[in-house]
Image (cartoon, grey):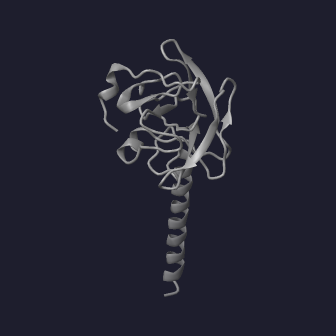
Amino acid sequence: MSNLLPRISRLAGIALIGILAAACGAYGSGAGAGGTQGQGASVAAGPPTIGIATSATLGAYLTGPNGLALYVKTTDTANTSTCTGDCLTNWPALTVAAGQTPVAGTGVTGALGTFTRPEGSTQVTYNGLPLYYWVSDTKAGDTTGQGIGGFVVASVSGTPAAPSPSAGKYNY
């Protein structure tokens, strides 16, 4: 019995370390409090800075703290997201920790804010519209989600860019 107790203690310690490592890894990748969020989502230690990039075809658009394009969903309304389930898997919400406020980078002229999603995460908004990433955008300058499933690049002007002909390709 005395030999069994140290073994159980070691196993419990190893399991605890694994659980803590998994929790920390999920939080840092954006998969923590926000639920089904991909590589683009942001739940960071400090408030995220929203920046801008420019496309010859789309004009000036918003980017997240990781430099990836941000999108709005044309069916969303002020502080209300219609993207849930599979939609969130493909369109990760830009989120912050509760109580954080996003910071406007140079050239960002609209109002940044947040609202609490039904599952409890805090999503960032621009002029009241929820912001998302597209899971297939992998580097700064990618805007491959433009017009897919009712999503358009979040324009700095606040007027959504016109959807491309692929707008009906996915129904989210």
The one nearer the camera, 69 or 7, is: 69
Q: Position of residue 75 (x, y in %)?
A: 41, 36
Q: Position of residue 5 (x, y in %)?
A: 52, 82
The one nearer the camera, 120 or 22, is: 120
Q: Quadrant of residue 124?
A: top right
Q: Position of residue 15 (x, y in %)?
A: 50, 66
> Please, which residue is most extreme toward the top here?
56
Q: Position of residue 87 (x, y in %)?
A: 38, 42
Q: Quadrant of residue 63?
A: top right
Residue pictured at 64% horizontal, 39% vertical: 48
The one nearer the camera, 5 or 96, is: 96
Residue 51, compared with residue 13, is above or below; it is: above
> Please, which residue is most extreme toward the bottom here?
1
Residue pictured at 43% horizontal, 35% vertical: 135
Left or right of 19 in this view: 96: right
- For the C terminus, the image quarter is top left
Residue pictured at 46% horizontal, 24% vertical: 143
Q: Quadrant of residue 60?
A: top right
Residue 143, compared with residue 80, is above or below; it is: above
The one nearer the camera, 53 or 24, is: 53
Residue pictured at 53% horizontal, 57% vertical: 23
Instruction: Give the number of marks.
Output: 0
Residue 20, compared with residue 46, is above or below; it is: below
